[in-house]
Image (spheres, rainbow, N blue to C red):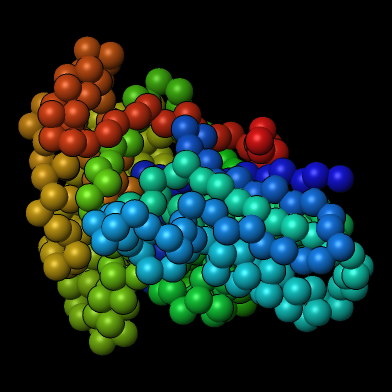
Amino acid sequence: MIIRKQAFPRAALIGNPSDGYYGKTIAFVFDNYAAQVMLYETPELNLVPGLRDQPQFANVRELVHDVGLYGYYGGIRLLKASVKRFVQYCDECNISLHDRNFTMRYGTTIPNRLGLAGSSAIITACIRALQEFYGVEISLPELANLILAVETDELGIDAGLQDRVAQAYNVPVFMDFDREHMKKHGYGIYRELTIPSDLNLFVAFRTDLAEGSEILHSRLREDYNNKVPAVLSAIKEWASLTDTVADALQKNDYSTVEKCLRRNFELRCEVCASTVSVKNRRMVELAHSVGAAAKLTGSGGAVIGIYHDDKHFNALKELFNANQIEIVKPNIVTGGVEKADW
């Protein structure tokens, strides 16, 4: 038996980065790229290294380039941490596991360390494969929590639930991380929603901005814990913007959505200025220069925005490509797509 599972990059339409601070967000996953995991039964347990785990290089420049793309740690640590946490979860829930072994290998086409949740996508695909191999059912809110725990508890990465909720649910999701609900249930209030097909979204990114989400969240966490007034106020406003966008989507009021995207980015620059690099800001400014609303999709390195028609998109593409920025029209996943084709 060969098990193939996949998970997709996440784009935060509105509300980020408030998901780790009892805020509200709307996010979705899109299948232009994917993280894939293959698992099959073998006599011994074996985790196969991928491109991120390359130990040999042609020269020092290739090593520097590799670190710039993937950081100092590869994908194997994600698989190890996922398996460990999955087993602990099953033990805590008194779920018995059979004693058969497996080989697991992974691959990903998701641009790395650009705020598209590429690492959590590998973890999500891994846990989905383990669920099928061991026949374990996990509710979607618990699955999102489990994925987050792999990163925060096992790997020490400061992160929030938003990415993992979107990847677990595999549909666009409105997320309300209400403090009292979180304390009582351990997860937020999640509502699946529809993003109208005639809302023309784009996602753009450049590959020389990789820094990882931990840089943004570690700084924001410190300000939040210190109750910096501007940060607490921003989180409330991001939540309000999320409510406004959810209502506007139902009414096909895209001008309001555009205004909220612009304000989301302005607010981020006001309270997280040190984590918005010149090149990150430049991507948004380029989009604004041709009349497109845009904001960062996540921690940095990628933006999400709205274009008006194909002529407008082509103008964006020409401008972005001239500045070494890739742009795609995201194919939004609407559920039920988990099995990889490799």
Residue at image location 40% in from the left, 40% down from the top: 247
Q: Residue furthest front?
A: 58
**Residue 105 at x, y percent in the picture:** 65, 53
Residue at image location 33% in from the left, 36% down from the top: 203
**Looking at the rendering, in which quadrant would you find the N terminus?**
top right
Residue 2 horizontal side relative to residue 342, left or right: right
Q: Is residue 172 above or below residue 221?
A: above
**Residue 251 at x, y percent in the picture:** 40, 29
**Looking at the rendering, in which quadrant would you find the C terminus?**
top right
**Most foreground residue, 215 or 181:** 215
**Most foreground residue, 150 or 45:** 45
Q: Residue furthest bottom?
A: 226
Q: Is residue 195 above or below residue 263?
A: above
Tag count: 0
Residue 56 horizontal side relative to residue 79, left or right: left
**Most foreground residue, 319 or 58:** 58
**Residue 218 at x, y percent in the picture:** 31, 76
Q: Residue furthest top?
A: 311
**Residue 19 at x, y percent in the picture:** 41, 63
Q: Is residue 28 visible?
A: no
Q: Is residue 282 above or below residue 318?
A: below
Residue at image location 70% in from the left, 38% down from the top: 339
Corner quadrant of residue 147: bottom right
Residue 301 horizontal side relative to residue 252, left or right: left
